[in-house]
Image: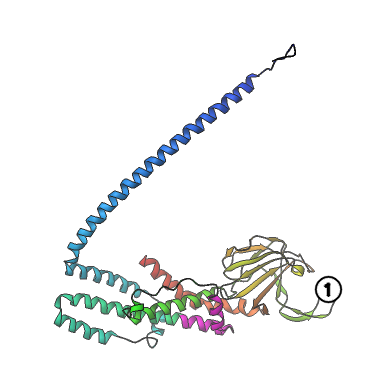
Amino acid sequence: MRSQGQVRFIKVSAKLQMRLAAAVFAVVLVWLASLAVMAWGQYRAESDLAAFADKRARVAKSEERLEAYGSDLDRVVGDLKQRQDFLEEMAQMLPDDVVAEGAEGTVTDSSAEAAKTVEKVGQYIPQARGLAEVEARQLALVERLTRFADARARRAEAAMRKLNLDPKALTRKAQAGMGGPFEAFAGSDKGELDPRFERLGLSLARMAVLERALDGIPQVVPATAQSITSGFGYRRDPFNGRAAMHAGIDFRGPVGSPIFAAADGRVTWAGRRGGYGNAVEITHANGLMTRYAHLSRIDVKVGQLVKAGETVGGLGSTGRSTGPHLHFEVRINNRAINPRPFLETAPDVLKEVRRSRAGHSAVAGAAQ
């Protein structure tokens, strides 16, 4: 570089030259890759369009076959009967004790009237007798499933009452935060839907709400505890010796030992909380809230869904604490209740309910 009669030299080392060459090569490579991606995208788009056109052609052929299929009424009846046999076989796998419990009441038994309908249809429209028979079997299955759902709902309610909980209050909490536009069953707004089908839908919905509320009942001991050092209720405060209300129970244990969620729920607090120290709060589907305090560490975040028995933190001595322990609370509408009956009674009370639910899950899995 010549400047004001002086010549200056800029030396470019071999290493720098290699780096510049590599950078140019990388730019070219990225450019070529971009072209390749664009070409591939165009190819995929064209392929998708071709596949869609082919699919439309197949749909047209299916419509033609459907017209021919519709003229073969015997084949339609055969397929419906085969599906109905499968559904009835699945229904027979339901737990016997629960089915027996729901054998009476809740819904009517329309089998006698359905048999009369089949006979009449057979007399006046012989070619439709097979369809009438399938319909009769479907209605019988709907009624049976309704009784089964009602029986499971009654079991869930009974389990709540054994734990001194109000089923209506818990289910109201479990239904909180729900909404959306109203969409009626197809035909129900015109009076075309058989009321037994609608009743089955309502029974299944009620059963689901009750069992979801059960899942939120504390049922897992939250700590691998050596002993309970302090129970629920009034006690002498360990710091000032005055009478005070202890809103939970304390589990003593080694620092860092795992703390478990007592029930399914969503984490609504995870952090420092005054005298509780490091604390985790879990709100459950039934409106119950469980609190885990004095933790040495927190393993969950606000908004996280947790299952019963899942680790939420480690036992510690943070906050207003005299030594390593877990302070565990159960609250309903921010009112503290004694957790011990839940932890001692809930597992046995819910055992039968879970057994019936497991049987139903096995049926659903086989059906899928």
Q: Residues within 10 Å of mark 1 (few under 14, many from 20)?
A: few
Magenta-tinted stretch? 153-175
Which amino acid, by three-letter code, is at mark 1?
Phe
Q: Hey, which quadrant is residue 264 in on the image?
A: bottom right
Q: Quadrant of the C terminus?
A: bottom left
Report the residue marked by disc 1. 239
**View extreme (right): residue:** 240
Between residues 325 and 40, which one lies in front from this camera angle?
Answer: 40
Q: Main secondary structure of the magenta part?
A: helix
Q: Is residue 145 visible?
A: no
Whether the magenta-drawn stretch holds residue 5 is answered as no
Q: Quadrant of the N terminus?
A: top right
Q: Hey, which quadrant is residue 253 in on the image?
A: bottom right
Between residues 43 and 149, which one lies in front from this camera angle?
Answer: 43
Position above or below: 101 against 70: below
Decide if residue 157 is on the left or right side of residue 60. Answer: right
Between residues 349 and 338, which one lies in front from this camera angle?
Answer: 338
| Residue 333 in picture, x, y percent from top left | 64, 78
